[in-house]
Amino acid sequence: MESLSVALGSRSYPIHIGAGIIERAELYGPHVRGALAVVTNEVVAPLYLERVCRALQSAGGRVTPIVVEDGERAKSWQTLDRIFDQLLAARLGRDASIVALGGGVVGDLAGFAAAVYQRGVVLIQVPTTLLAQVDSSVGGKTAINHARGKNMIGAFHQPLAVISDVATLETLSDRELRAGLAEAIKHGVALDERFVGWLEQNIERILARDRAALIYTVRRCCELKAGVVADDEREAGVRALLNLGHTFGHAIEAGTGFGPWLHGEAVAAGMVMAAQLSARLGLLAAPDAHRIAALVARAGLPTQAPRLPRERWHELMAIDKKAAGGRVRFVLLEAIGRAKLQAGVDQRFVDEVIAAAAA
Amino acid sequence: MESLSVALGSRSYPIHIGAGIIERAELYGPHVRGALAVVTNEVVAPLYLERVCRALQSAGGRVTPIVVEDGERAKSWQTLDRIFDQLLAARLGRDASIVALGGGVVGDLAGFAAAVYQRGVVLIQVPTTLLAQVDSSVGGKTAINHARGKNMIGAFHQPLAVISDVATLETLSDRELRAGLAEAIKHGVALDERFVGWLEQNIERILARDRAALIYTVRRCCELKAGVVADDEREAGVRALLNLGHTFGHAIEAGTGFGPWLHGEAVAAGMVMAAQLSARLGLLAAPDAHRIAALVARAGLPTQAPRLPRERWHELMAIDKKAAGGRVRFVLLEAIGRAKLQAGVDQRFVDEVIAAAAA
């Protein structure tokens, strides 16, 4: 098992990465103070819920399991309210802890529940998808969706620990694995050219679920993300670079009604579009844009966006939460591994990229 | 105008107290960064909304007014969701500010909206009731209610400024004024015997809405509360003392279905019950318990609780959010001005107080 730390002063927390660690009571022990709820979904529950509950009980916790529906639709107020109802029925107080067992949706939803239940209780992230292990379980972003936009309602609420067991990735579908890989590629493309090189050499091992390759991928992504989060917890600056591909990506997800495209798939296509936009603006060398598209394609991820009317693109990107003062700020690339934030991008270039990407 | 500060390091903020200051653009100016929403209710809107909007516009803000229903019922997810809908429709981004213009309900609701809209935006509190000016607008507690309990869903989200205009108290009903006075009395009874003495001498001036008396009351309460919040922002210890009267009080509100009793009225009766419990436990001298009840009565506030079955009391107090690990912790009194937190109070004494208070 490997461990690293997210350095946030008195709120620093460990990330444990290994194979088969999900049932190790001693990892939960330091964070169990009394009653706990494990929030998971109907797909993950039959696979891992019992093992995690047993570990928490061994660590001395009274455990209430809460199972929600699968999929992005669970990131709704309705589902959240059912979680609150079960927490209150089980009389969990302010000293309770919530364990988020599952992928990005469960982490966002259970994380937001922990952020606002009785004005905030302890959160432990136990991510079981590659996307959640390389990205969403680290850094404290939690949210639910609103009819008018994704992740519009949420909070920054850091976990007390992240326990990433790559053995759980064995039950993941190929499609989900690839969607997670999209965020790993994104970390490299935004921040670390060497990691992109490593991914290019090891992508087949990752897709074959080689444990050592998965552990290295999760660790390197967590290192990169932990560094960014320590510098800019609330995304006032550098952290926004990790939104590479997300302005286009969120528009793809929203424009297709949240469902047909997985988040990682939308980010993959969005990242290719952001690279193309960077190239059209003369920021990024054209071969680098091609190199990114090639890696995305080798990961089995989409490099093209769906067809949507141009006005719909504009509308969806304008409401994106990164819109500051009415202007869309893009994360662009100066090189592979060197992302930058830019406002005031000429709409003409954006339109060209949209037209080309959906061709 | 008088100003004091809530000392929270880089998140410190000013409280401005005066008469007629609600329309002073220069008080809002330092906190206006771009678009703003003013959240208020249908009772306050005709009285003060236009004046506040004008001041914010003079300070350079683009203002979206949002008017919600009056009363505790507004602290619901449904109302919150309508606020989010209007914020999103007006394309307010992460750099927006929310101004809470109204009493405790509006402050809690708009404050929680600010805490979670796009993971948190700036909040400015403009309290227009005595309760909000002496208590709820200061300290960052925000919340909505859940069917199973009051204030169960919320966040700590400090404002960037509090602007308390005692001239707005002139439009308050006598009943609302008294309900606010209950929280002022509570601050004194919990923390400051001298302030209780001052209230005993000046209660008629307050009830007659003498501006100097109101300004002193608001200032002294804010000083007391600011000190407590600076020491214990998240209510891990000393801040819980300000919940004096709230364990019984919340049970009264919930047991009567949130409506017939104003929050301040329930706190008044709850504070008298807490004093009686302290006396029965031999902590507080009996004459001091009588002195508290006498002041509450002179303020025109209830000293008796409504009749509820004993089991209902137990149920309502057990789910109260101060319940930690399944045990109810009471705020008790060792003397007037000296509150203490105590767990493991013998249920027999609690039952005696309930029986006596509803007699």
Image (spheres, coloured by chain):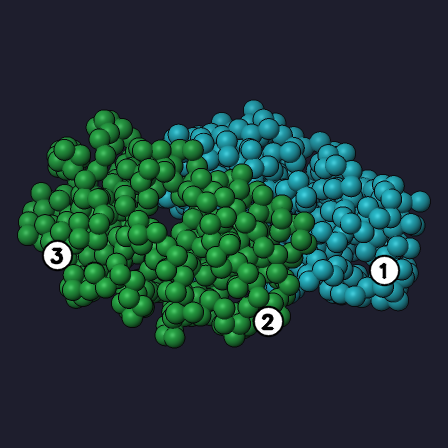
Chain colours: A cyan, B green
Observer-nearest residue: A65 or B329? B329
Marks 1 and 2, how far apart in space?
32 Å
* Residue A326 placement: quadrant: bottom right
User: For numbered disc 3, what is the local secondary structure?
Assistant: strand
Q: Looking at the image, is B25 positioned above or below residue A20?
A: below
Q: Amino acid at mark 1?
A: Gln
Mark 2: secondary structure: helix
Task: Identify the residue shown where x is 23% and y is 34%.
Answer: B306
Task: Determine the secondary structure under disc 1.
Answer: helix
Residue drawn at x 71%, y 48% is A183
| Pointer 1 residue | A347
Question: For this view, does A208 lie left or right of residue B56?
Answer: right
- Residue A275 placed where, x, y %? 83, 57
Give residue B125's position: percent from left, percent from top: 46, 60
In the rendered image, which quarter contains the C terminus of chain A? top right
**Which subunit holds the residue at mark 3?**
B
Residue A176 is labelled as none
Badge 2: residue crowd in 10 Å (few <14, some 14–19, many ≥20):
some
Indicate which disc residue B58 carries.
2
